[in-house]
Amino acid sequence: MGWGRSHLQWMRLANPGAAMKRLPEVGFGPAHGYLYLHVSPRAVAKHLEWNIAEILGYPVKLNWQPQTLRPGALKAELSWSSLVGCGSKLASSLKGWHYLTFEVYESAGATGEGSLYMFTPELGLFRGTIGTTGDLLINENQLQSILRENLRTTDLAEEIEKLMGKKWDIALEPFRFARENLELFTDKIPV
């Protein structure tokens, strides 16, 4: 018996006095994650802080830095804590600012799965499910759908790469590399 309407009916029959509870719109308990704003126009920096604060439920002050890969643009990152599901709310809201390039990661908490959102204006939004070890999870239904729809090996490979977010990884890698190299460089500066 699968999880669905029939399973819920069975649960009611097995425990007729139990009241069915409705889950809140945003999940239970705390979650944490990271927001990497790789590219942002200078003019909207304060507005983005207000937008992020509204979603997270507490004031946010980002440490804006010049984005060396895009002259005139800024970059910032934030380690955040809030309710489960805030990662998707952040990604949904930020993608509306279509000129941003960003990544949002919500960690795999008690639910066992986290989420990764990557956005570029050229590619749009990618969402992936992340396991407790940090791996991207691809479920059986996604693979079966690809196998049904693609008979050629090249099409199959392209579709699997889409599931893995390969185009987004390629587009965002220079920004990640620049951030990591800056961290490595500043770690080696003598004090």
Image (cartoon, rainbow, N blue to C red):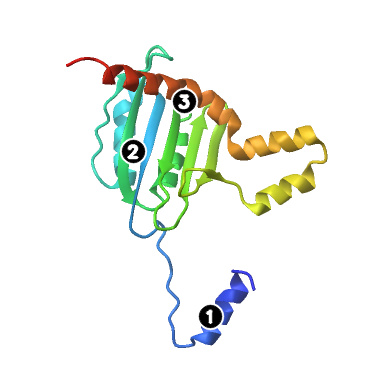
Left or right of residue 62: residue 150: right
- Of pointers 2 and 1, the one earlier in the residue sequence: 1
Dot 3 alpha-carbon crowd within 10 angstroms: few under 14, some 14 to 19, many 20 or more = some
- Tell me the element at label 1: helix
Residue 26 drawn at (x, y percent): 40, 56
Q: Nearer the viewer, residue 51 or 111?
A: 111
Residue 40 in sight in this render: no
Of the 4 image quadrants, the one containing the N terminus is: bottom right
The percent position of residue 67, horizontal first and vertical second, equals 37, 17
As measured in the structure, the alpha-carbon distance from the residue carrying label 3 to the one carrying label 1 is: 48 Å
Please name which of the two marks, 3 or 1, marks the residue nearer to the observer. Answer: 1
Q: Amino acid at mark 1?
A: Met
Instruction: Please indicate whether residue 190 sits to the left or right of residue 69 in the image.
Output: left
Q: Amino acid at mark 3?
A: Tyr
Residue denoted by label 3 = 99
Q: Residue at x 55, y 30 (%)?
A: 168
Find residue 22 and report its horizontal and vertical position in percent: 43, 69
Marks 2 and 1 in Cβ contact (< 8 Å): no
Judging depth in this view, the residue of 100 and 177 nearest the camera is 177
- For mark 1, what is the residue? 11
Q: Is residue 114 visible?
A: yes
Which one is closest to the eye, mark 2 or mark 1?
1
Mark 2: secondary structure: helix
Residue at image location 27% in from the left, 21% down from the top: 187
Residue that label 2 marks: 51
Residue 114 against residue 8 in the figure, above or below: above
Instruction: Indicate the quadrant where residue 122 lies.
Output: top right
Marks 3 and 2, Cα distance to the nearest angstrom? 15 Å
Q: Residue at x 55, y 38 (%)?
A: 126
Looking at numbered disc 2 in the image, what kind of residue is underneath it? Asn
Category of crowding for the residue at label 2, using alpha-carbon neighbours closer than 10 angstroms: few (below 14), some (14–19), many (at least 20): some
Instruction: Decide which of tag 3 and tag 2 comes sooner along the chain.
Output: 2
